[in-house]
């Protein structure tokens, strides 16, 4: 099915620099926005309202180094109390924003009070998508530090872990659990892990990576039913298998937390519609991070990016626009995943690609796959090839049409294609 | 001024070939990078996740770590938007030979200086 094209949103004028900023959310995006506002010379009060009781922390390690126990809590901290005190940034934690009144630039809080500001940044993130029917004492999701703490204690060498969904989070949890010696079964309804995003060949390669690490990967199988006995979690699949485990971890994607922002225009994909400056449909109200959907000038379509790099880039873009120093966010999306001792990186948007060119050796899990559409590089996926992906990211943003023979040639420097 | 400890690290021609080269100097694994006509030296292993910078790339004069795309200034080791710093070394090129002073420089208020050996 062809992807629907989208039009760039109309461009209202930039607002004068506001007196104060209220941020709904206190995650990566909010923290980066606060830091950027101060770096760009914004002097007014900044308040972050976070539903969790934790000060802003990094989420990427929660499924990786933190989950394995290699990293500790204090290493995750994004804004220390000392930095906040010195920079006049107030953290109001354990304080959920229930509504954003866009016309008044006000946030309503769970305790019934209202806070008004000169500008509001919506950085409410997302929450794990729940699987209907998969409920019980042995079901886990992973999004917050509290989720990770609980899971970390439970991923023991003798544990039998069932992971539902072989996306990035599911795969990282499977990898971490295997690394800790647990017995791991992964149930994925698609034919390959990430096949819909990366295509069959790469999906099969990821499947081989899982299986090589001793994961019992069941692709093309849906969860048919779920129940708990006194001693086990029991999953039955559409293929007729019955899998017993101690624990079920669901990695079925996320849902953007748009509910408080009912007055803002949403995109058809469910995110808050923003432009490349993170402006919403309402003057003085910005949105950034997992909660947004933005028109990407390179791909000519809306993108929902649920990852760390986008949280950073949009947090910065929103802060710069608020501080009166707008700079468009138009980089090619990029993310990484560390799983099964490999560093995976992806940039761009592979939808609509008509040609795949591989550099390196797929069978050794040491390669980069380039996705071209009409000769133009649209995306790249690499295993232990961060250098290639860094170059590809620039080529994608430049809409370059590189010679496939050069892409394939290990002796060619990809950065030469940029000049 | 501190005493210089120049150690021959590579030929300039070898650095030119791929604009990055992993070498071992006085037991240290060091990455050499060519930016324009200048050679820079950093610890090869990234301070963050122990990926090799020589497996990364050079973009617009900065070293991109292959692990998580941290952008490192090859002259100072400073990492964009991070508190961490990648150890950097002084480099001298003479008659087509690259020399490295294998004592990491540390950032000071006035720029970089050689670490005091204790």
Image: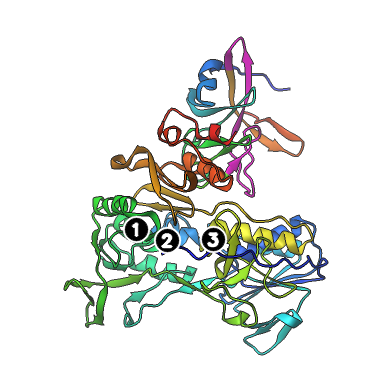
Q: Quadrant of residue A96?
A: bottom right
What residue span does the magenta drawing correspond to?
B71-98
- Counting every numbered tag in the picture gives 3
Q: Residues within 10 Å of mark 2 (few under 14, many from 20)?
A: many
As drawn, A334 above or below A363: below
Which residue lies at the image location 67% right of the left edge and 58% below the top edge?
Answer: A316
Q: CA distance from mark 3 to mark 2?
A: 11 Å
Q: Quadrant of residue B34?
A: top right
Question: For numbered disc 3, what is the local secondary structure?
Answer: loop
Q: Which is more toward the observer, A293 or A385?
A: A293
Instruction: Tell me where residue B114 appears, x and y as whole percent.
Output: 67, 29
Question: For numbered disc 2, what is the local secondary structure?
Answer: helix
User: Of tags 1 and 3, which is closer to the observer?
Assistant: 1
For residue A82, say whether it is visible: no
Instruction: Tell me where residue A285 appears, x and y as whole percent.
Output: 71, 73
Would you name the residue on which mark 1 appears? A195
Chain letter of the residue beneath label 2 in the structure image: A
As drawn, A92 above or below B35: below
Pointers 3 and 2 in contact (C-beta within 8 Å): no
Q: Quadrant of residue A312?
A: bottom right
Would you name the residue on which mark 3 appears? A58
Instruction: Tell me where residue A128 appears, x and y as whole percent.
Output: 44, 73
Q: CA distance from mark 1 to mark 3?
A: 28 Å
């Amino acid at each position: 099915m062809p992807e629907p094209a989208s039009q760039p949103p109309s461009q209202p004028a930039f607002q004068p620099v506001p007196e104060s900023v209220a941020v709904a959310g206190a995650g990566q995006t909010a923290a980066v926005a606060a830091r950027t506002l101060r770096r760009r010379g914004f002097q007014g009060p900044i308040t972050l309202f976070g539903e969790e009781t934790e000060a802003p922390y990094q989420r990427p390690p929660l499924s990786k180094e933190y989950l394995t126990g290699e990293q500790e809590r204090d290493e995750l901290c994004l804004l220390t109390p000392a930095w906040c005190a010195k920079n006049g940034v107030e953290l109001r934690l354990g304080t959920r924003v229930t509504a954003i009144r866009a016309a008044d630039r006000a946030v309503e809080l769970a305790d019934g009070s209202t806070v008004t500001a000169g500008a509001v940044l919506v950085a409410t993130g997302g929450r794990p998508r729940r699987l209907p029917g998969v409920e019980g004492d042995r079901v886990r999701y992973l999004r917050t530090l509290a989720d990770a703490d609980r899971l970390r204690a439970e991923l023991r060498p003798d544990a039998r872990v069932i992971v539902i969904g072989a996306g990035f989070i599911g795969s990282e949890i499977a990898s971490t659990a295997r690394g800790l010696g647990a017995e791991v079964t992964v149930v994925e309804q698609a034919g390959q892990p990430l096949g819909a995003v990366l295509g069959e060949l790469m999906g099969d390669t990821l499947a081989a990576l899982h299986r090589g690490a001793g994961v019992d990967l069941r692709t093309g199988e849906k969860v048919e039913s779920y129940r708990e006995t006194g001693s086990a979690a029991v999953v039955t699949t559409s293929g007729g298998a019955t899998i017993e485990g101690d624990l079920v971890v669901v990695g079925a994607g996320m849902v953007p937390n748009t509910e408080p922002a009912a007055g803002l225009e949403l995109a058809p994909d469910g995110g808050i519609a923003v432009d490349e400056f993170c402006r919403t449909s309402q003057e003085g109200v910005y949105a950034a991070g997992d909660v947004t959907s933005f028109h990407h000038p390179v791909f000519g379509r809306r993108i929902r990016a649920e990852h760390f790099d986008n949280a950073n880039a949009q947090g910065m873009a929103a802060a710069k626009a608020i501080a009166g120093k707008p700079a468009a966010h138009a980089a090619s999306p990029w993310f990484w995943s560390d799983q099964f001792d490999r560093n995976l990186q992806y940039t761009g948007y592979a939808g609509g690609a008509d040609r795949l060119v591989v550099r390196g050796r797929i069978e050794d899990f040491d390669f980069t796959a380039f996705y071209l559409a009409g000769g133009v590089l649209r995306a790249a996926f690499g295993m232990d090839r961060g250098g290639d992906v860094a170059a590809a990211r620039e080529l994608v943003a430049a809409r370059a049409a590189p010679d496939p023979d050069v892409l394939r040639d290990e002796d060619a420097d990809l950065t030469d294609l940029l000049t | 001024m501190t005493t210089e400890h120049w150690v021959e690290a590579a030929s300039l021609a070898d650095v030119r070939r791929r604009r990055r080269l992993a070498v071992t100097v006085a037991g240290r694994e060091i990455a050499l990078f060519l930016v324009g006509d200048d050679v820079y030296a950093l610890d090869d292993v990234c301070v963050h996740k122990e990926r090799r910078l020589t497996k990364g790339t050079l973009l617009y004069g900065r070293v991109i770590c292959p692990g998580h795309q941290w952008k490192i200034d090859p002259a100072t080791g400073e990492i964009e938007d991070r508190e961490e710093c990648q150890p950097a070394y002084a480099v001298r090129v003479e008659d087509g030979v690259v020399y490295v002073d294998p004592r990491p420089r540390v950032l000071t208020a006035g720029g970089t200086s050689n670490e005091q050996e204790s």
